[in-house]
Image (cartoon, coloured by chain):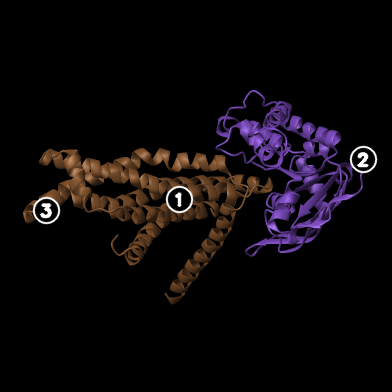
Chain colours: A purple, B brown
Amino acid sequence: MAVENQGSAIDVTDLHKSFGTQSVLNGIRLEVKQGETLVVMGRSGTGKSVLLKLLIGLEPADSGAVRIGGQDIGNLSRNDLNEVRKRIGFLFQQAALYDSLTIEQNVMFPLERHSRKPQEEQKERARELLKSVGMEKDLEKLPSQISGGMQKRVGLARALALDFEILLFDEPTAGLDPITATEISHLIADLKKQRHMTAVVVTHDIPSARIFADRVALIDQGKIVVEGSFDDLRSSQIPFAKEFFENGC
Amino acid sequence: MYRDVGTLLASALEWFGELALFCARLAKAAVTPPFEWRELLRQCDAIGAQALPLVALAGAATGVVLSLETWDSLIRFGAKSFLPSIIVFSMVKETGPIITGLVVSGRAGAGIGAELGSMKVTEQIDAMEASAVDPYRYLAATRVLACILMLPLLTITADFCGIFMGWVANTLAAPVSLHLFLENGLKNVEFADYIPPILKTAVFGAIIGAIACFQGMRTRGGTEGVGRSATSSVVLSSLFVIVADVVLVRLILTIWPSA
C-alpha cells in the first residue's frame, strides 16, 4: 500500500518507560508518515499499549521524545497538550465507553466539547457515525446493555467523531468474532483511504493487520526488533519475526 | 518496628502531599472556564436530591431519640419545659450537621469512590483525558461543588425533620401544640445561631467530595481496587469530617462567641 504524503506525523526517539523496577520500553524509535498506517505487533506484556499511551501523553516518558506534527509533547503545557490531543482519536482496548452516558451521548461527548457545529448537526454527525458502524438502532442504550463487540463499534464511532489527523487503535479486533473483526479491519482500511488519516494500530491479529497495515513493527523486550511491509516481515528470517508469524497464522 | 512506623509515616506524608496537589488542580479546574453546568446539575441531583429521604429519616430518628432520652432526664431535674430549646439547639448546632455529614460521607463517599474507581480501572478516565477533556474539571470539580452546595441544604432538611419529629415524640408523652413547642424552642435562638453550623457543612461537603474523588481517581488493581477505594473513601471522609467538626466548632466559638 503506497503512502502518498511523506511528511512525518509521529516521530519517536529513544523512548524509555519503566514501572517501578520493570523496564517496559527500552529505547523505542519509530516514525510514522502522514497518511500511513503502522501496525505494532509483539507478545503480550511487551509495552505496546503503553507505547500508545505515551504517544498521546497519558503516561509520561522516563526519557526520549514523542513528536506529534513536530511538537515534542513532553515539553507542552497541559493546555497545549490538549490542543495536540484534539487532533488524535483513540480507540481503547475495552472501548472505555462512559458508563453513565447512552451510546449516542458517548459519541456526542467529544463533539459537544470541541466542535463548533450547532447541536442538531452534532447529533446528526453522531447518528451518521453510529450508522457507519452498524449501531444506529441502539442510540438510547447504555454501554452495559450491549455486547463487547458492539461496545468496540461504538468506541470506534467515538474515536472518529472529530476529524482527527491521527488515530490510535489499541487491539481494535481483540475479543471479536472473525466476521466482526474483518468488518472492523475493512472499516479501518476504508477510513484511511477516505480521510487519508495517519494511524498506529496495536494488534495481535495477523489477518487483520494484513488488511490495513502499510508497515509493521515488531516489538520484543521493549525494542523494535524489525519493521517493514507485512509481506517483508512474513517472509523475514529474523528468528523472532519468523516464530511470531508462524505461530500467529 | 521503627522501620514499620517510618514506612507508615512516609506513606501518610506521601498521601497528604498527593492530596494537596490534587486539591490544587481541582481548585483551579473548579474556578476556571469552561464550566460543566450540566454535569454539576446531574451531581446535585445524585448527591443532594437522591440523598434527601435518607437524610430526612436520619434527622427524624435523631429528633425522636433526642426527645425521648432528654424528656426522661429533664423530668428528673424538674426542667421538662426546656425540652423544646434543647431539641432545637442540639439539632441546629451539632446533631443536624454531623448526622448529615456522616450520612452523606457514607452514601456519596462510597458512590463517588466506587464510580470514579471503576472509571479509572476501565480506562474511562484515560479516554476522557485522551479526548482533551480535563477529568478534574468534568468528574472531580462537579462532584466536589455538588457536595459543597448540597450539604447545607440537606442539613436544613435534617434539622427540620429532627425538630418536627422531636415535637411529635414530645407531644405523645405530654401533648403540646406545634406552635407552642416552636415558640419555646426558638425564643432564645438567634439568626446567627443557624448560619455558622449550616455553613460548616459546606466544609464537610468539600472534605467528602475531595477525598472520595481523590481515592477514586487513584484506584489501582481492578475490581478489588474499586472496592478498596469505596471503603477508604467512606472511612477517610467520615474521619476527616469528625476531625473538621472539632476544629470548626472551636473556630466558630472564637469568631462568633454567642453562636
Tag in front: 3 or 2: 3
Mark 1 neighbour density, 10 Å: few (under 14) some (14–19) many (20 or more): many
Q: CA distance from mark 1 to mark 3?
A: 37 Å
- Quarter placement of the N terminus of chain B: bottom left
Location of residue A90 in the rendering, given as x and y in whole percent from the top left corner: 71, 43
Q: CA distance from mark 3 to mark 2?
A: 91 Å
Tell me the kind of residue under disc 3.
Ser
Residue A211 position by quadrant = top right
**Chain letter for the residue marked with disc 2 in the picture:** A
**Chain letter for the residue marked with disc 3 in the picture:** B
Q: Is residue B20 left or right of residue B76?
A: right
Q: Is residue A240 left or right of residue B203?
A: right
Tell me the kind of residue under disc 2.
Ala
Residue drawn at 32 percent across, 41 percent down: B56
Dot 2 falls on a residue whose secondary structure is loop
- Residue highlighted by disc 3: B73
- Residue highlighted by disc 1: B148
Mark 3 neighbour density, 10 Å: few (under 14) some (14–19) many (20 or more): few
Dot 3 falls on a residue whose secondary structure is helix
- Residue highlighted by disc 2: A2
